[in-house]
Image: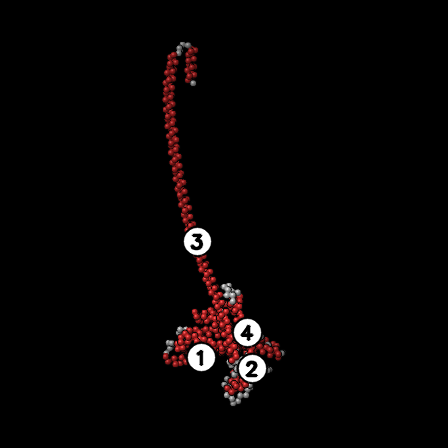
Amino acid sequence: MSTIAFLAAAGCSTDTSVAGLTAEQVLEKCASEGHETFALGLPLGEIIIAIVAFAVLFFVLRKFAWPQFEKAYDARTKAIEGGIAEAAQAQNEAKAALEEYRAQLAGAREEAAKIREDARAQAQGIRSDLLAQATAETERIAAAGRSQLDAQRAQIIAELRSDLGRMSVDLASKVVGESLSEEAAKQRTVERFLADLER
Amino acid sequence: MSLSLTAIGQLLADGESGFSPPSVEESFFYDKLGDGTIITSVKAMVLLVLGVVLIIGFFIASARPAAVVPGKLQFFGESIYGFVRNGVAIEVLGKAGKKWAGFLTTLFVFIIVMNLWELVPFAQLPVTSHFAIPAVLAMMVWVIYNYVGIKKHGLWGYLKLSCYIPGIPPAMHILLIPIEFLSNILLRPFTMMVRLFANMFAGHMLVGVAATGVIFQLQSGGAGYAIAVLPGIASIGLVFFELMVCALQAYVFTLLAAIYIESSLADSH
């Protein structure tokens, strides 16, 4: 490496006269002449300030910032997980309620069908009962009527028979008791007979 | 390489009409305390402390409610914490990740804020471009991952876990054990600190060169007014590019810290 390149790398001005000097001497000369500062130098003050500043930053943030952020993350995670669990529970409840309603609805339908079936059967029963009853009643009434008629006829026949007998006797006796010679008497007798008849 | 980039830059600058890009001294160490052996930039240290105060203020205000339904501020804070907690800590470390989420988020937020000072108007100086800051962070990660490894497996068990690769021919161990020791125990913090430092350092230089380019062109007048559009566009583009770099480097640093801790806690290589 040439002297110029070395000087440039060390940050010294290249017009410094360095003939016959070692590298250390050149650097010393650079520094003492107050020329350019060595860019890769490590000034003590800067090191101390950097260490202190970084340490302060690290400890302050560790105490005041990061735990708060972690707390917020945790709270958020918990809130989201809680929300999910709650939603799942609500959904399960809703599903259970729906199942229950469905079951109830199916039960109600079944019951309604049964009731309808029962009603139909009952109506059928009532109708056939009434029909049988009515038929029986008709029969009964008809039978009663018939027997009454029979009785009345028998009575009438009996009455007529007895009347006819008596009347025949009456008539005969009258016919026999009256003198038929007299026209007027004959006429009277006939008329009386007829009147008797009409009565 | 016989000439450094700075020397080439100076040659080019001499050849043209006197444009000199801002030097490292002008970009990073313009307000030393004394001769700059203790503090090389007062502004960087002010920004560092201010950044820490702002982060603390923001997160305390954001975390105070701890509400189940967060407000805008709480949501923003929780998103940052949740990003590192779930996307880095638990993703890499598994169940143990929750324990490390606080440390890794602190690391991520600290680095991204210190990076973003590069783009904040009037601040415009990435604190992480001062080598001491990435060095402190990387050494801290180094101490932590070695400590948890030794605590869990014992010194010998930890060294065996880190350096011994099972299932290879015995002769290969002569070669591989030193390599593994070097890469896993010694070099990790250096790659970490240099990666972050170099990205932020170079990014700040790039933005600075583009911005001074605009000013130079405008000052030279004439055709410069037209030419100034080019570094102007580059400046704006670089700011967005740096925005990405700031976020990406903070993420990479945090992710690597998590991966190193995981490798120390793992039960097998």
The residue under label 3 is A97
- Mark 3 → mark 2, Cα distance in angstroms: 85 Å
- Mark 3 → mark 1, Cα distance in angstroms: 71 Å
Write down the quadrant of residue B18 in the picture. bottom right
Disc nearest the viewer among 2 and 1: 2
Q: What residue type is labelled 4?
A: Leu
Q: Position of residue B83 (x, y in %)?
A: 48, 69
Element assignment for label 1: helix
The residue under label 2 is B34
Q: Position of residue B232 (x, y in %)?
A: 58, 75
| Quarter the C terminus of chain B occupies | bottom left
Element assignment for label 4: helix
- Mark 1 → mark 4, Cα distance in angstroms: 33 Å
In the rendered structure, find residue B50 and report the number of the disc placed on it: 4
Q: Is residue A50 above or below residue A15?
A: above
Element assignment for label 3: helix
Mark 3 touches mark 2? (CB < 8 Å):
no
Q: What residue type is labelled 1?
A: Leu
Q: Where is residue B197 in the image (x, y as percent from the top left)?
A: 51, 78
Q: What residue is shown at x 40% (from left), y 41% (from top)? A: A122
The single residue placed furthest to the top in the displayed view is A181
Q: Do labels 4 and 2 share a chain?
A: yes
Q: Is residue A130 above or below residue B180?
A: above
- Mark 2 → mark 1, Cα distance in angstroms: 34 Å
Mark 1 touches mark 4? (CB < 8 Å):
no
**Front residue of A79 and B229:** A79
- Mark 4 → mark 2, Cα distance in angstroms: 22 Å
Residue A14 appears anywhere in the view: no
Q: Do labels 3 and 2 share a chain?
A: no
In the rendered structure, find residue B186 and report the number of the disc placed on it: 1
Q: Does residue A27 appear left or right of residue B182 in this picture?
A: right
